[in-house]
Amino acid sequence: MTGLLKWPVVLALATAFLFLVFNIYVAGHPVWALCVLALVSTGFFIYLSNVAFAYRYLFPGIAGMALFVAFPLLYTVQIGFTNYSSNNLLSLERVREYLLEQTLPDETQAMAYTLHPDGSEYRIVLMPVHEEEDELDPSKLASLQASSFVSPRLALRSAQPPELTEMLPLDKASFHVNDSLPLKELLKHRDVLMKLKLKLPDGRSLSYAGAREFGPLNNLWKANADGSLTLVDTGEIFQPNNATGYFENADGVQMQPGFKVNIGLGNYVRMFSDPDFRKPFLAIFGWTLAFATLTVVFSLIIGMTLAVVLNWEALRFRTLYRTLLFLPYAVPGFISILVFKGLFNQNFGEINAILDALFGIKPAWFADPLLAKVMLLIVNTWLGYPFVMVLCSGLIKAIPADLYEASAIAGAKPLTNFFKITAPLIVKPLMPLLIAAFAYNFNNFVVITLLTNGRPDFLNTKIPAGTTDILVSYTYRIAFQDSGQNFGLAAAISTMIFFMVALLSLAHLRIARVNQDIK
Amino acid sequence: MAIVTGKSQRWRVVAAHVGLIALIVITIFPLLAIVSISLRPGNFSTGSLIPSTISLEHWKLALGISYQAADGSLVLPPFPVLRWLFNSIKVASISALLIVAISTTAAYAFARLRFRFKVGILNSMLLLQMFPAVLALVAIYAIFDTIGSYVPWLGIETHAGLILAYLGGVAMHIWTIRGYFETIPVEIEECAKVDGATHWQAFRYVLLPMAVPILMVVFLLAFIGTIIEYPVASVLLREENNLTLAVGSKYYLYEQKYLWGDFAAAAVLSGLPITLVFLAAQRWIVSGLTAGGVKG
């Protein structure tokens, strides 16, 4: 960068970022603003000073990891201690603001309105609420019109319709009341009218209050000095309750929406003590372990056998076989899983068509819990064995050939070769990779979600839970699907999965390191 | 190998061939079946796996062309598959390019420069990579929701936001490139520096041209990794025209609206290029796997 251009660019960037930080701060998120400020100023420091010049190369990568890998992990743990959910989405201040903005049209002071075309634009005429036959009586009409108002010409059809307009007394305006729009035409302007505020000469402001009336809006709530809110209608006082996350009155009646509060270990207590929750949770945990273990075991058996066979030099066409057997790994997972979903379909699926023709059976792969689990294992083994096959092939190639020559001289059979030479030599380097595969399948969200989406569900559970759900897919359902968008609970379960993943990683690292030392 | 073979050997070879062929038939059955289904008329026909009449109706729909059904009604494409494919390729190419840029510079620092906390940063990076993004989806959603309220073009439902989310996953790639850099003798750069090149020039004009092969590999790996990514994309993208292929494909197979034949054509259309890219990059992907990563 030339020196001349450098400083203006730096200055422009700095101003832009400072403006962003300021906006975040003004919006009421001082912590977020501080985080952004820290990140941005670190970036500026690194690129402008000569002290930390190695970090110039590192900053984008490390910032990316910190922002989108490390920070989400920590944030998830934090959310796990809150009641964050679709009911308790906003902060206390935002909920208070929201409630204070709630209004109810005042029916007693409402005025009837009509819409009159005036050229290509429109005028609104407000009259006191009256019976329709009153308009036929000239004297009553005159008194009605005496207390009526008319708007200036309004461009309701334009791209930016007006949102506030001053009303004039009808008798002072030079507007001859013509035929008003029929109701059907009127409704076409509903969206614009709902945003329009009409200001009367006496200062009152009227808002849309139905297809025929405009009226002043009354606030539903009144703020008190101690932070509580009064329901204007009944005079009841609602106090914010920081334990439950709701505004509550003396009887404990909760006002929706709630706000986000820290509930400590509440989500964890619920996980382990609520029997309605604990039973499916333990079943899902058990199935997660079984799913990951069995997948690894089956993939290992098939993959290792294939690797051994394909390394047998007496066999021809080995490259062709290897490429074809590798295919499941090369096809994108989201496509092959959905292909299986279709093939396993009970009525239209090709697998049941074949089974029906051969044995006359049509298993209900998606409705029966056991069959659904079997199907998941079949599909996941299909997806997983090429990985093990490729790994084992590489490891077997590294075994010195003279070991097999020696065993041939001793007259050993192939099985003896496998169990006495091949298996013992590859099991050590294979171990950390198998643990990685286990950890991967422990969190194999995609195969569960796309194939069964956790179904069939358990019966009689408060939160929908599936018999084929694993922990991550269950978490996803709690957070984003049918189970009430309970982010806090989902984050608490995620936090527990973190610990299990951390344990697995530790085991992985330790075994990998022991192997390294041996080398 | 000079091993005397017995008579049982021939039988074992035959048995191995039979066993392998049987397994291959089972393995590629779903892949062949889907091609055949895509050419079969109708969405519900069962029975013969080899279609008796070949119909291109599903392929027309997958390519965004409507067709005239037998009863005269016009069948419109159910989903914008080409749009999804385009979205996927767009997001994947941009992410992969940025990932390569970010991880190359970081890898250079780890391979060549001396700075504090080097080992610590490297280890914590590898540790972090063990936690898949699917575990932190709630937080990722909340983060992008917040970002979007200040910078709308980076929020939920934007491709720029999705690309930003993918930039976190660089640890494996940094590791790969660093390994390659360390095989290049450092003396070459030192010569350049003796001739008056700065660090940046030595990196940009000396080291980088020698590392082009590994950069292409990392680009391919990042491209494939992004194009098959499902969880984060499914949380950040919801509108039909915005989806990537990985998120959109499942809508074909809803219980209420089961478009088996249409799905088959779309799956072959979009899966084939990705599979070919994967097979082409297979050699490097496999060597990356043995380094400890697993396809995600």
Image (cartoon, helix red, strand yellow):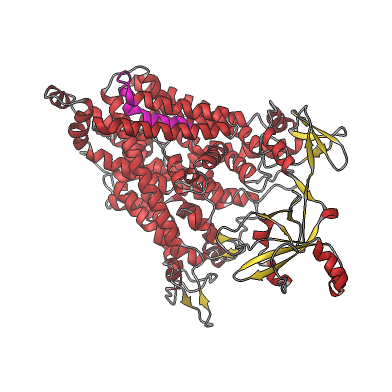
Q: Is residue A319 above or below residue A138?
A: above
Q: At 80% from the left edge and 65% from the top edge, which residue is drawn?
A: A145
Q: Position of residue A258 (x, y in %)?
A: 73, 38
- Residue B287 placed where, x, y %? 31, 38
Q: Residue at x 54, y 36 (%)?
A: B136
Is most of the magenta stretch helix, strand or loop? Answer: helix
Left or right relative to B252: residue B174: left
- In the rendered view, would you say B141 is above or below A500? below
Question: Does residue A288 appear anywhere in the picture?
Answer: yes
Residue A67 belongs to magenta span: yes
Residue drawn at 42 percent across, 33 percent down: A15
Q: Residue A364 is drawn in which quadrant?
A: bottom right
Residue A406 in view: no
* Coordinates of residue A450 in the picture (x, y in percent): 54, 51
Q: Quadrant of the N terminus of chain A?
A: top left
Kindly indicate the quadrant of the structure image that contains residue A237: top right
Give, as a single range, the part of the protein colored magenta: A47-69
Which residue is at the front of the view, B176 or A343? B176
- Residue A496 among magenta residues: no
